[in-house]
Image (tube, grey):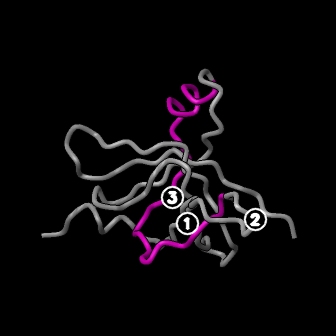
Amino acid sequence: MRGPGRFLNRRLEVWRPTTVPDGYGGQETTLVQQPSTVRAKVDQPSNADQMLAQQAGSEHDHTVYLLPSADVRRGDELRGTDRLGQAQVFRVLATVQPSTPVYSKAPCKLIQRGG
């Protein structure tokens, strides 16, 4: 039997903000790549999700679906490539699981990289 994971057609790297010593007695926050990738499906948010995001002043412009066991947290970055091979970076704004944990849903903001 095929589970919901069959729809997760991309692999994304997880980068997590981590506090490290700055070498001068203080600390700085840097993004550290986590040891494993996550399976994901990246979608545009539904009209209802877009309306709710606008009303709340959120930057939500993509929804990433993950397995419920994926270790993805608010503030993480998910990095990968789109179907055309273009690099994409998504900042996770939140993570939500429905009452029946078939998947996790992460509202995200696509970060445009200069270059």
Residue 57 horizontal/vertical position (percent)? 65, 26
Mark 1–mark 2 Cα distance, whole angstroms, equals: 25 Å
Mark 2: few, some, or many residues within 10 Å (few <14, many ≥20)? few
Mark 3: few, some, or many residues within 10 Å (few <14, many ≥20)? some
In the picture of the structure, the residue carrying the numbered disc 2 is 24
In the picture of the structure, the residue carrying the numbered disc 3 is 42
Name which of mark 3 and mark 2 comes first in the sequence.
2
Q: Please identify the quadrant where the C terminus is shown.
A: bottom right
Q: Quadrant of residue 81?
A: bottom right
* Vertical placement of residue 26 versus 97, above or below: below
Name which of mark 1 and mark 2 comes first in the sequence.
1
Residue 15 horizontal/vertical position (percent)? 55, 66
What residue is shown at x 56% (from left), y 61% (from top)?
18
In the picture of the structure, the residue carrying the numbered disc 1 is 15
Q: Amino acid at mark 3?
A: Val
Q: Which residues are magenta?
A: 29-54
The one nearer the camera, 108 or 76, is 76
Name which of mark 3 and mark 1 comes first in the sequence.
1
Question: Can you name the residue that lies furthest to the top here?
Answer: 55
Residue 85 horizontal/vertical position (percent)? 66, 78
Q: Amino acid at mark 1?
A: Trp
What residue is shown at x 71% (from left), y 55% (from top)?
111
What residue is shown at x 61% (from left), y 64% (from top)?
20
Is residue 39 located in the magenta-colored stretch of the structure? yes
Q: Nearer the viewer, mark 3 or mark 1?
A: 1
Mark 3–mark 1 Cα distance, whole angstroms, equals: 17 Å
Q: Amino acid at mark 2?
A: Tyr
Left or right of 111 on screen, residue 115: right
Q: Quadrant of residue 4?
A: bottom left
Mark 1: few, some, or many residues within 10 Å (few <14, many ≥20)? many
- Asked if the residue at tag 1 contacts the one at tag 3, i.e. Cβ–Cβ closer than 8 Å, the answer is no
